[in-house]
Amino acid sequence: MRRFITLLVLLLCAVPFGVSVSGCSKKSAPTFCNGGDSGVIVGQPTTITLQPLVTGYSLNYAQIGQLSQPTSTDCKGNTASVGSYTYGTSDLTIADVEPTTGKLCGGTWNRHTGGGIPDFTVCTPTNKSGTAYLTASAEGATSNPIPVYVHGVVTSIVLGTPSTDCVTDPATNCSPAAYTYAVPSTSAGACPTSAAHPSNPQLANGCCTIPPATIAPTSNALRPYNPNSCFSQNTTTQLSARVYAGAGSGQTNISCLAGHLQYNAESGSSGTASTAVVAIDPNGIATANQPGSVLISANVANAASSAGFFSTCPPTSITLSSPGATTNPIVVNQNNQQPITATAVDTNGVSLTGLNLQYLSTSPNTIPAASPIIPILAGAADIFAICEPPSCNSSPYNQIGLFGNGKPVVSNPLSITSPGTNSTVLYMASTQSRYIVSQDFTRTGLSAPLLLPYAPNSMVITSDGSTIYLGSPNALMVLNAISSLAITRVDTNSPGSVLAVSPDGKLVVISDPTRQVITIQGTTGAVVSTYGGVGTRAEFSPDSQAVYITAGNQILVFSQYTGWTSITPSTPATDVAITVPSVGAYFAGAVTTARGYCPSTTVSGTTATNTFYPLADSQPTVTDRIAATNNGQHILGATTTSGPVLSDLRTNIPVGACPTSGGLTFTSTLSTSVLSQITPTAITGVWPTADSTVAFITYNGTGGVIPAYAPASSGAGQITYVKLSGSATAPLSGAVSSDNSIFYTGTAGDNLVHIIDRGTLTDTSTLAPNLTGTSGSPVPVDLLVQKPRKTT
């Protein structure tokens, strides 16, 4: 009994204690938005926002879309957590919405269909155009209404001038949904009203009787878009378009029913960033940036359409100057800076800024092209600036030439002289030998002969002197020439003759006569492009963007902007020389002709068709080999026919912008001189010095002299015949030192290399490279290249 009483006492004590503990537990008191003890609680959603606020959505009949996820905030502006939203529409017959997911229908969703078909899976068109407003709600709060524009299926969008008649010719400038407008309106998506126009009713076609006002940048007047003109830099314009549904006779203009258009500038095939040409904001306000033309696409109802294009006016002139320069040419010592200024003006006379100009040098190995100019070695050069597509003034292919976009513009030259002398590293090889040797004139004696895998048929060196390419019928041989000669690559997949290497050292042109294919390849051997034919000569433009190739009955041009162009000349071309400035090229042959880099443009509406590299000059003089002087005043050629004869074309090469329609025209005056003291069987080269004062002619045959021609400002220049020493019978190959002081030539008869003093025009000394053929007999040096180096 005592135990029972004790247990009862414990139970009686335990129960109240437990109840007491339970009664003490409680939740935190809610915080109310009004600071009181009732009302909306902090953390509860009070504002729900649906995006996009202004533009809304555009749906074709029966098209399915999806509302964006709403965002919610509480009365304090903090993010509110919402478990789920309920979506609704103002008009089920125009646009329907799945209540729990926000999935849209340009018509009406199926409900209670039966037959195992889930609800909200079939969107049935009502073919009713109009605007419905959709909302999201949760916990007593409702979002802003989002307009959903429903209309016929969009088939095309055409960029054009704004409408002046919103009734019969509507465009997006008539649509209340087209822009964010600055004047009051009675409700979202309605036509804007103002004190001047208190009533601006919406027409049956969805348009306003008075087009909506737009928000323009405050610093510039807003111009209407016009597809028939370009816009100067920093000009702003309001894009406008016409939106169509259907096709043919059933086509309908639905510009004011389609909703808000999103415009985008397309980069196009040129690869140039579209924003470099034009920037377009969400309201369709375009700001012209850099010269060029880009395609404009418009997106509505989740369908993008190529709507038109936008053109920023190109430069018509680029003027180079050097502040403080008092001499011509400008004298700049090695490693000193000479500032240069480029001033560009567009077709409307507006000054341009921020152009992506390329600077070109006629002697990049001594005076590189840059701003400012910094000569690295003694020499002479002309410096040009060029606005070159696609990096400057780019254009879609079918609009090249429209308003001048897509065409290059070149500046006047700045002539630079850096006084002093350089030393030379001379590389000597022969088409009859598997050896190559070099002579560094800062050191004593020739290098050890390097044995090549095959006898070369051609040899070129990069502008920086780092790499030598040798062609052969068996393989391409690549040599490192930075310090001592070493073979770095033998490519049996690239047999043929090496015709040229680009000034930037990134591209090599190889012609394989066996397979009859011309290949442009990169420095690692990767093929960039190929074309059928057998090339004989080639030369790159100084900017490395184009290469001109002679291939017998065709002239080929490979441009990284326009690809391959094949031209059939009146007579076969045998050699090529890039003009200075580099606005085209002259071609040797039975008739000496020139081709300009400005295409001949024909415009129809807003579409341009072009003939690339049209004829720019033609002279009835025969030339076998040809070269251009750096001062841009002479094209020098020589031939064995009827003489032999040297031809001097005193040229007037234009600078500035390309013509709006036809191509460039080069004017030239011809004078000829008989090369009386030589009996050549072939002309092997014409070698002007970088300062344009003299050119040497090399040849196969007999004569024992080198013709040295000094061009004159009018009439024929003076020819001096430099007597070769010893038993030399003909100069076969040539190379001019970068400081213009020495001409090197490999000779037949003695198999030596003769050193000609350019100042005195005398044969001062010889080198004995001792190249041998397969039989061990001496062979002549008929392949020569050089690179400059500092005198040490």
Image (cartoon, grey):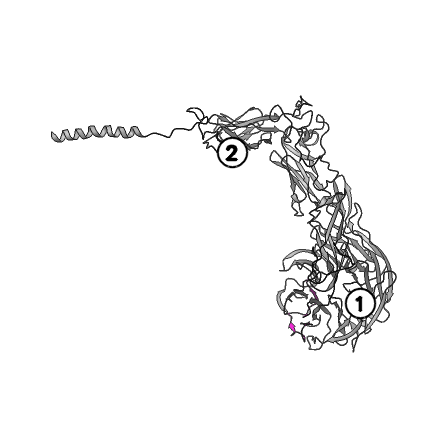
**How far from the left and from the top, in percent, is residue 705?**
81, 72
Q: Is residue 246 visible?
A: no
Residue 457: in magenta span: yes
Left/right of residue 172 with respect to residue 653 in the rendered view? left
Local packing at callout 1 (Cα closer than 10 Å; few below 14, some 14-19, many 20+) is many
State the CA–CA distance, disc 1 to disc 2.
78 Å
Q: Which residue is mark 1?
A: 697
Q: As rendered, which of 611 and 123 lies closer to the eye?
A: 611
Task: Specify the quadrant of the image occupied by residue 701.
Answer: bottom right
Local SS, label 1 = strand
Badge 1 vs badge 2, beta-carbon distance below 8 Å: no
Relative to residue 84, is residue 435 depicted above or below? below
Of all residues shown, which one is farthest toward the right? 715
Q: Which residue is mark 2?
A: 69
Left/right of residue 644 with respect to residue 373 in the rendered view? right
Residue 517: in magenta span: no
